[in-house]
Amino acid sequence: MDIMMKKNCWEFKKCGREIGGVNAAKDGICPAACNAEADGFCDGKNGGRACVYVIGTLCDGECRQAYESKEKLCGKCEFYLQLKKEYPDRMTIFSYVDYMIKHDKRRSAGDK
């Protein structure tokens, strides 16, 4: 069964910094767009719905390196606020870490 992917941060914000995006060559690819480890979190592609937890995202032209600063800035973001409404129990750092542990792509098939 395929999970229908929902709108990712780069689609919502129209930044063009996703892989193959209109601004990727000029401004670089945002780490959320290429974070394959977070693929599927809240039904998104790569880190597209986990951007608040991905260090080094390039939102609004500003690189956000530390989670503490991201928490303040992202807390005002329309996309993040929408995600919190859609997934009130999953949009926490603890839920994200739990997801990452359970979906560790580096594990061999025998470890599942």
Image (spheres, helix red, strand yellow):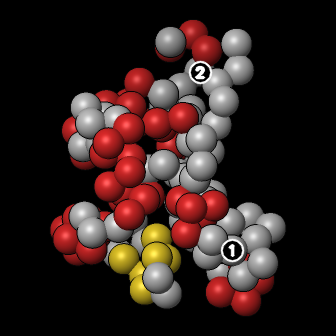
Q: Position of residue 96 (x, y in %)?
A: 34, 40
Q: Position of residue 26 (x, y in %)?
A: 73, 89
Residue located at (36% from left, 56% from top): 80
Q: Nearer the viewer, residue 47 or 110?
A: 47
Mark 2: secondary structure: loop
- Please state if 21 lies on the left or on the right of 53 as rendered: right
Q: Are marks 1 and 2 in contact (CB under 8 Å)?
A: no
Residue located at (31% from left, 45% from top): 84
Q: Position of residue 49 (x, y in %)?
A: 48, 49
Count neighbours of disc 2 (C-alpha within 10 A) and say few if under 14, some if 14 to 19, many if 20 or more: few
Residue located at (63% from left, 71% from top): 14
Q: Which residue does the numbered mark 1 point to in the structure image? A: 16
Q: Using the rendered image of the protein, determine whether residue 10 is visible from the camera's viewpoint.
A: yes
Count neighbours of disc 1 (C-alpha within 10 A) and say few if under 14, some if 14 to 19, many if 20 or more: some
Where is 19 relative to 98, above or below?
A: below
Residue located at (25% from left, 64% from top): 75
Q: In which quarter of the image is the N terminus?
A: top right
Amino acid marked by disc 2: Ser
Q: Using the rendered image of the protein, determine whether residue 54 is visible from the camera's viewpoint.
A: no
Q: Which of marks 1 and 2 is nearer the N terminus?
A: 1
Amino acid marked by disc 1: Gly
- Please state if 46 lies on the left or on the right of 75 as rendered: right
- Quadrant in which residue 76 is drawn: bottom left
The mark found on residue 108 in the picture is: 2
- Quadrant in which residue 65 is drawn: bottom left
Q: Distance between the residues labelled 1 and 2?
A: 34 Å
- Please state if 48 lies on the left or on the right of 82 as rendered: right
